[in-house]
Amino acid sequence: MKNFISFCCFSCEIAGDTTSISLSELENLKNSYGYEGKNYKSIFKKEVYINYSCLERIVFSNCEFKSKISLHKIDNSHKIAFCNGIDFANCIFEDDVNFKRFVSGTPLPDNKYYNNERDTIFENCIFNKRVDFHNSKFVNSVYFTNSHFKDYVDFHACEFNKIACFYGVTFDKAPNFSACYFKEPKAVNLINVDIDKLDFKSVEKYIEDNYQDETCENKQEITEEQRNNNCKLKCAKHLKDSFRVIKDVLITQNNTLEAQEWHKLELYAKEKELEIQLSKNKNDNLKKESKNQVYNPKDYEKFNYSKIIPLIIFLLKIIGHLSVNILIFVELVLVAPFFTIMFYCVYVVFFIYKILTFILKSFYPLDINKFIIFWRIKFNKIKRKLIVSGRKMLDFTLWSDCVLLQVYRNTSNHHTNFLKILNFTILMISLYAFMGFVFSKTINFILSFNSVSIIIASYIILLVFALMLVNVKKQLYQYGVILIFMLCGAFTISMILFLSSEYISIFCFLIYFLGVLIFYLFFICKIKLFIFLVRFFAYMIFIATIITKPQFINPFTGVFSSDKLYESQFEKSLNDLNASAIVNLASILQNDFNLHLKDQNISFTELNSAKALIIANKENLLKLNDANLNITKEVLGEKYTELLKIINQDKITENTIKSTSVLYSIILLLCIFSLQKTARKNSIVPS
């Protein structure tokens, strides 16, 4: 194509200026580009290339491009320039558009071209495939009014010197405005921009589709997977910066409502960035795949009978090892605690022996220089291990940040969806009230199990939940499984070592914690039946809670006034006792053990005072010495034993409510924070 000097138009059956384009060139357009003139548009069926800079304006309005249209630089030292702008208004682009590294509205010497201030027009266009404007410069004003980008559009590193109008533009996929420069931010028109189709999945899809376009270091020592992760991380950071650029422009224009939508997308990109970093930083031993893990369809056509016997032997070995370990564990821990203590003593002695042997090694050469070298090398090795451990700890910091972003996204769309966070808050209140009711009614049933049964039940519950998370193949959840099993291991070890009466409260707390996680997964589930059932459950229990026990809504009631959330069984049992037993109990608490079995005539006021004294000092009934305990049992008989059992039951219930209330308080405070922040963002009250 020649370097056009005069005005050229390809709009509505007009192919160029008849004074400058001959019939032979028009025929060449038809042959080379499949040009077809209609009374309403011009159609180019073949690829269109613009090879040279154009000094005057070019108009392609009302055209349809069936194939690609692109700029080709003949001389790489110069950008293609449209000195008086271009006009692609009302065009339809069926294929890719490549206008990267071009300049529109290039300044020319004064008085040489009188109409050099014309705009660049892409109004009412439909882009069905990718559009690339990266590293372009718009010296004049540019208009994309009411255009529709159905695929990715790349504006990264573009420069806009005057008006940049995106009024009514629709982005079906995430646009890239990374490193864009707007000389006049208030001249950017982003009113009615439609980004309704952009969500977290579109951010993930953008990174997956575009990370290969990133330029990353291709060192020999890194694997292909590591290089891909580096490119994905770079792509996520660029996308985050793209959303930040538009957000900053809108904030400059005091358009906070639209800015928060782009900020939400920015947080989506940040979450994805953290996920990629977690995947990038994980242990190489965990992420390396075996070279034998190659899928071959022929391996699955016939049953391999030759491997039946090795498989049976392998399974028998595993069963044998597990059986031996279980028998040793049961024998040492449950049957022979003395041997357990001896085993640990021998282990400690052996460990001390290894340390002393290691220290003595440094003295073997009888050379001070070699002694220094020995310890310097060992200290450097320890230092490297500590540094590696420190880096691994940073992974959990990234994990917690990523989880927090994910929770905010799933519960309130980063404080932009008030109804969603309201539903989640009601679900958490209902779950706490429901679990509190269940614990208070089933505490006797739970107490009927011994400590070993509780520990086994805890592991079964955690194993089921861990399997649920592992099935979701994300590094984010894999770290969660590691954390949960670390906590579970600490819990189990403490139970085996101490077996204190608090294990019931810990077990109930664990059940409530898992209930929160499971109902959170139900809340974010996309299956409509689950969504309906969860919301029905939440609202029914919430209404029942408001009617029967509204104190469950207050997160601090269970922490500081747990007696208000449950009916004390001790007080109920105390009311069932006769006056003589009540007086005797009051005497015991006052260290008066001259008890009388005969009925005592006391007033109603004195009886209430005795009850109040017993309730206030009921813990002292558990601390009687052997002599006083025998006297009390002789006088009160089975009633005293039942009272002790009920006191212990109330204590466990109270501790359970307090421990679960702490977690509930944290959750509800975060929900209230999200509620007020979301409400403020969607109101005229400034945040």
Image (tube, grey):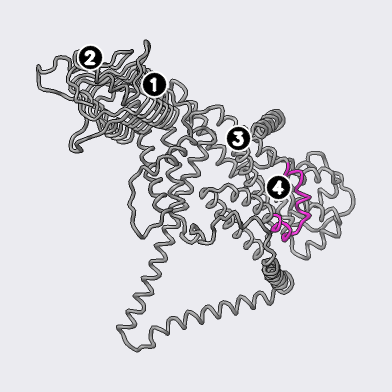
Say which of marks 1 and 2 sits in front.
2
Percent from the top left, x then y, of residue 447? Answer: 76, 53
**Mark 2 surroundings: few (<14), some (14-19) or many (≥20) residues within 10 A:** few
Residue 57, how many percent across, how many down?
A: 22, 19
Considering depth in this image, is 365 or 304 the residue closer to the camera?
304
Q: Quadrant location of the N terminus?
A: top left
Residues at marks 4 and 2, CA–CA distance in whole angstroms: 91 Å
Mark 3–mark 2 CB contact (< 8 Å): no
Query: Vertically, is 548 above or below 602?
Result: above
Q: Distance between the residues labelled 4 and 1?
A: 70 Å
In the image, residue 136 lies at what x, y percent? 26, 31
Residue at 70% x, 38% y: name it: 434
Region in magenta: 438-457
- Which residue corresponds to mark 3? 526
For residue 347, which numbered disc appears in the image? none
Identify residue for label 4.
653
The residue under the point 67% across, 69% down is 310
